[in-house]
Image: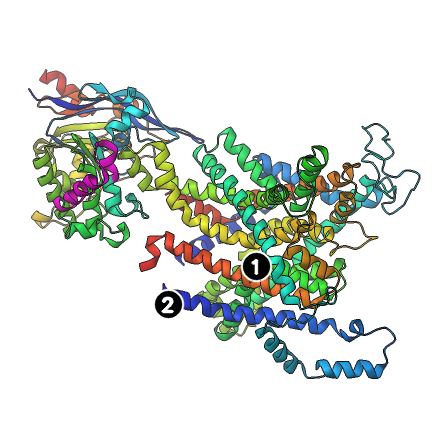
Amino acid sequence: MVEKLLEVKNLYTHFFTEQGVIPSVNGVSFSVNKGEIVGIVGESGCGKSVTSLSILQLIDKPGKIVNGEVLFNGEDLIKLNEKQIKKIRGNRISMIFQEPLTSLNPVFTVGNQISEAIRIHQKVNKQQAKDKAIEMLRKVGIPNPEKQYYSFPHLLSGGMRQRVMIAMALSCNPELLIADEPTTALDVTIQAQILSLMKNLIEELQTSIIIITHDLGVVAEMVDRVVVMYGGEIVEQASVYDLFENPRHPYTQGLLKSTPKVHELEYELESIDGNVPSPDNMPTGCKFHPRCPFAMDKCKEEDPSLLSVGNDSAIKCWLYQDRKVVQV
Amino acid sequence: MQANAESKSELNINDKIAKSKNQSTTIRGLKLLLQSKTGTIGFIIVICVVLVAIFAGVLAPHDPALNNLTATLKPPAWLDGGSWNYVLGTDNLGRDVLSRIIVGTRVSLLVGVFSVVLAGLIGLIIGIVAGYYGGIVDNILMRLVDSFLAIPSILFILVVLAVFEPSLLVLIIVIGLTNWVTYARIVRGEVLSIKEREYVKASKSIGTKSSEIMLVHVLPNIVSSFIVISALSVATTIILEASLSFLGLGIQPPDVSWGAMLTDGRNYLATNWWLATFPGLAITITVLGIIFLGDWLRDVLDPKTQVNQKGGAK
Amino acid sequence: MRKYLIRRLLQIIPVIFIITFVVFVLVYMAGDPVALMLPEDASEADREALRAALGLNDPFIVQYFRFLLDLGQGNFGTSFRYNQDALPLVLERLPATFELAVASMVVAIMMSIPLGIYSARKRNSFVDLFITGGSVLGKAMPNFWLGIILILLFAVNIQFFPVSGRGSLLHLVLPAITLGTGVAAEMTRLIRSSMLEILGQDYMRTAKSKGVNNGRLIYKHAFRNSLIPVVTIMGLQVSQLVSGALITESVFAWPGLGQLLVQAVNGRDMAVVQASVFVIAILVIVINLLTDIVYRLLDPRINYS
């Protein structure tokens, strides 16, 4: 029996702007097992980042979690007060972000920023925190860490900065790491280095990971299980093998087609027709129907629900709604 | 550089939109104004002040310069000893405070508006010359601009006022001479970017005079920045004029100015507080109205701030 | 850094030349000072002799260079009013002005930084509206009127502070508040907007995701970054501080440089006007240079790029 580390249940996060309510995340449920790497995939604006920020209650005004549970080792993080959630942040669950340059504070040295995280959560003195920070810098493969400890972020390259972010995030041995587009802002060669670094460290530290990305290459490389999001909802969930072998949802199929398959020397990029719907103007029925090649009349009127199709997989599409009845 | 170009093209688009809907511009503007509370308040205050200045002669219940030694230092009407004949009381020479405030509006607005117009004209000319000729002319003019920015303009004003006898005209000229710098910079930047555009090169090749080219193409693009800067500039100029008059370096008697009224009123602080209170209130309310209106205009007109806001949100 | 300093110092030279030139032209245009210097009944021959002695008959450019030469030696001429050299007269007023300026800046900083930060954190709240409104009002209210009102309230009605003059710490309070409030009004607004920008930065989210608590989030991560614009803002306020000081000193009869300058302008005491204007201009330029240096020290990104 696998142990569930994190369980997001029926999460709704809405933004209350002057122009009206924007439902960025609309009833999202998924789970992360201990030692598992879960990928959340979707185009920008699909709510994947907001979902990840909601886990640690990092949603700023005017955003608000309006409903749902985030069970971490069985404890609902949403019910925690500020003081309690701060003990989780950076300690048991930590995050790394897309833009390593802007995500590091420009006026403090990288060492200062890493040891700050250590000193917040561990009872150590300055020297011990510094030693630990240097050790982390070494672990993430930064050359000459004793010297680089005193570097300001702008002096490092993009890849090095992301290594610093990883060192900072892993400095307190978190049980869960949330990586929001960790390689998007980096060069392709650096991307591969960062991914393999993350992979190695995770094995060593036994950390579970949620990777948020729009890059299916990253998913194939890293992930055990995939959650596909569209318009603030989950449209498909499957193991990575299943998903690539047998993508069920038309949206997933479109995504896979739009990924350049380098190893097949097939550079043609077939993108999905149409645009991502804006969250304040969602289509009726199934939100994907205006772009769906298989759209039926029913899709325009009624929204399908996410149904389990066995093998830890789930799908939210009218095409499979009837078949599922047959299957069960 | 690129952001600059973007905001300009946006500006052009705004202009086109404005032109295409010319008939209803006034109505649309009013509707837009009513959406902003402070904008509306500012607009109302400014309109009132302008009307008071224009009709000061009719509105003032008494001759502002008329001494009445039988009614000196009367308190405002609602206090003991006050009368509705002198609503805001009288000063040490028996002159009606309300009438003096009403007439004082004229000086404030005259100095505020005309010095800003003068500053805008100087800035326009210097900016076009610097931007169009470039090279050493530009270099010298921009050094001049730097120098004006490096030292507080009040120093220059004081030197001038030490040399020339202060009067309404001198004040307008000297304040205008110190305020042109901001305008010059905007115009220069606009000229530099327009100079490179194809249609300017084209009209030059047909032999149109360069000064004409510049005016025709630059003016539409700087109108909104000019309006926004001018509004706030008028506000600061009114305070400046009041300050100078307060120091005895501005408007001289028998002309009436709010600042000079405060100088007189200061001597009677202990016994006759109203003399120093009401002129100050008049200045504050007027300036507040102009700032409100100016801020609203900036939000509506200046595409640069809109671009910045978008950029800031990112 | 050194290169930068040298470049900045070189930039000051043309500015100083332009100031000297403008002042000289104005004084030249003012016409004949001889009439003021001699008794009314002096003969035309006496006048002519004095003109020749003062070199007033020389060509413009010769007079200008002589003027520059005099300035180089700190010789601004003699004050008619005090009948002594203008420069020492100006310099002895400096401490009083300096005291007022520093006290006002302290008042401005103590008001604007907490208010600006607080209203940025509570954006669009009632308190934010109140603070923002207050800063607009502070901008609209003329400095000298605020001074008069403060005198009326706290020196005349409640006779707690002295009405005017310099001496005890109590003398300093009202002038410093008068001048400081005007500066604080603008600073609060600018600090609020720079703080708003900083609060939306990615690194603030990173810090939050590390479990940094709110106080530390603001006073370590945000404040250190906001110092960069704040120093720039303070530099920009120097001009306002100077013009404010001229007026505030006159309102409170504060025996500083501002009061001296205003009296000199009123009395057409040109030597003192020139000397004060130069001293103030040089001070402003030096302060601006210092702010620029501090700015560079605060932002690690600038030194190297």
Q: Position of residue C250 (x, y in %)?
A: 69, 51
Residue C8 image offset from top left, x and y in percent: 44, 66
Residue in front for this viewpoint, A267 or A311: A311
Tag 2: amino acid? Lys
The answer to whether residue A145 is left or right of residue B190 is left
Q: Chain of mark 1?
A: B
Q: Which residue is mark 1?
A: B183
Q: Quadrant of residue C37?
A: bottom right
Extreme residue toward the right, this view:
B70
| C100 relative to A310 in the view: left or right | right
Badge 2 local density, few (<14 within 10 Å), some, or many (20+)?
few
| The residue stretch that appears in magenta | A116-139
Q: Position of residue A311 (x, y in %)?
A: 8, 23
Q: Quadrant of the C terminus of chain A?
A: top left
List the residue tagged with mark 2: C3
Q: Residues within 10 Å of mark 1 (few under 14, many from 20)?
A: many
| Amino acid at dot 1 | Tyr
In terms of secondary structure, what is the magenta stretch mainly?
helix
Quadrant of the drawing holding the N terminus of chain A: top left
The answer to whether any part of residue B34 appears in the image is: no
Query: Badges 1 and 2: C-beta atoms under 8 Å apart?
Result: no
Q: Nearer the viewer, residue C302 or B12?
A: C302
